[in-house]
Image (tube, grey):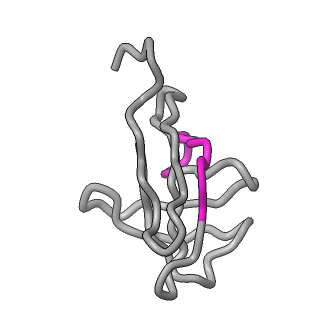
């Protein structure tokens, strides 16, 4: 799972340099469903929302595994475990 907060102004088509695991890297919102970390790590966007002026991007794992996300009104989001049968 990959969760990233960007300024609210970060939008589809944008690329920004930010730190991932403490190292500067490019983050590109390539399509409505895809966020790319660096040049090759494309992640499926499970959910994006605005919270306190920040855009929160919630993505699946690099191997394509996704997590269930349930919105709880007034409380934010709850992230559930990986789907049954996941090996990682």
* Occupied quadrant, residue 28: bottom right
Q: Judge by depth and name the residue closer to the eye, 17 or 35.
A: 35
Residue 3 vs 81, above or below: the answer is below
Quarter in which the N terminus is drawn = top left
- Relative to residue 88, is residue 28 drawn left or right? right
Q: Judge by depth and name the residue closer to the eye, 2 or 66.
A: 66
- From the image, give the main secondary structure of the stretch colored magenta: strand
**Among all residues in the image, which is located at the extreme front?**
73
**Among all residues in the image, which is located at the extreme left?**
22
Q: Position of residue 40 (x, y in %)?
A: 55, 40
Residue 58 vs 15, above or below: the answer is above
Q: Position of residue 19 (x, y in %)?
A: 34, 66
Quarter in which the C terminus is drawn = top left
Residue found at x 73% / y 66%: 13
**Residues in magenta?**
37-48
Residue found at x 41% / y 40%: 80
Residue 62 vs 86, above or below: the answer is below
Q: Is residue 10 magenta?
A: no
Q: Position of residue 33 (x, y in %)?
A: 70, 49
Q: How many marks?
A: 0
Residue 33 vs 53, above or below: the answer is above
Q: Position of residue 61 (x, y in %)?
A: 45, 36
Residue found at x 67% / y 70%: 14
Q: Is residue 47 magenta?
A: yes
């Amino acid at each position: 799972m990959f969760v990233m907060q960007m300024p609210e102004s970060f939008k589809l088509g944008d690329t920004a340099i930010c730190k991932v695991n403490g190292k500067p890297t490019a983050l590109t919102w390539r399509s409505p469903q895809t966020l790319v970390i660096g040049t090759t790590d494309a992640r499926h966007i499970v959910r994006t929302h605005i919270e306190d002026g920040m855009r929160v991007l919630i993505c699946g794992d690099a191997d394509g595994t996704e997590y269930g996300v349930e919105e709880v009104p007034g409380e934010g989001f709850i992230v559930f475990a990986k789907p049954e049968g996941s090996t990682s």
